[in-house]
Image (cartoon, grey):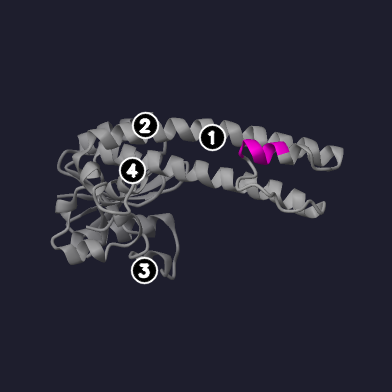
Amino acid sequence: MRVIGMDIHRVFAEVVALLDGVLTRLGRVDMRRDRLEAFARSTLTHDDHVVVEATGNAAAVVEVLSPHVGRVIIANPKQVRLIADAKVKTDKIDAAVLAQLYASGFLPEVWVPDARTEAMRRQVTRRTQLVRQRTRLKNIVQSILHAHLVPPCPHGDLFGKAGRGWLAGQWLPEDERAAVERHVRELDRLGQELSGVERDIARRALEDEVVKRLMTVPGIDMVVAVGLAAAIGDVRRFAAPERLVGCRRGCGRK
């Protein structure tokens, strides 16, 4: 069996092959779907095992390469410390270490979720990003009010109907008033986006028996249940409940 180590970057990957203890540099491949597909067809075989580090585009690499090789493995970068600590830091060394660790049976692997779980994770991430963007805009508006000695809003929600009516009556310099109005419009736009994402999450929740079971637990609503299901994936991959409880961020370890 040949082990292929790939050190992935934003625009390229350095590739080495390990066979019978001998390392061979296979060169660089552009990190574009068509180029990666062409590389797999021309260079890799169904007996190869490919090892990559967990990066933002690792899932796409797995998707493209999987039909052409025996297996694609994602390594946990936090546990592959010796790559970062290597005295001689080159892309080739990084790729080689990945291949050698896997061949030796010491590679800390990350679980690769199925397509449904991956899509669920993306939607949960999108919702989190939208919520954070909305919170940031609200904080900016609050900071503008604070800078101009505007008292705290007497209503529970500054951005609700009553709160906005109160806000419209407060004195602000013309440029600051325009900024507040712009931020409020963007807040509304993000709110519409958030509603769309939450509708998709709700649809997935209704179709997922695991999510529906999680929602029967007191204190776990639809959003939390989908987040848990997305993070955990197939619970059967954990050998014991203790392994699940000890799962770190992202629940990616095997």
**Residue 124 at x, y percent in the picture:** 39, 43
Amino acid type of the residue tagged 1 in the rendering: Gly
Mark carried by residue 45? none
Q: Label 4 vs label 3: CA separation?
A: 41 Å
Marks 4 and 1: in contact by CB < 8 Å? no
Q: Residues within 10 Å of mark 2 (few under 14, many from 20)?
A: few
Segment colored magenta: 160-165
> Disc 2 marks which residue?
200
Between disc 2 and disc 1, whose residue precedes?
1
Q: Label 2 vs label 3: CA separation?
A: 41 Å
Between disc 2 and disc 3, whose residue precedes?
3
Amino acid type of the residue tagged 2 in the rendering: Asp
Horizontal side of 26 relative to 127 (left or right) equals left
- Let me know if residue 126 appears in the view: yes
Q: Label 1 vs label 4: CA separation?
A: 18 Å
Marks 4, 3: nearer the viewer: 4
Marks 3, 1: nearer the viewer: 1
- Magenta-highlighted stretch: main secondary structure? helix
Q: Is residue 162 magenta?
A: yes
> Disc 1 marks which residue?
191
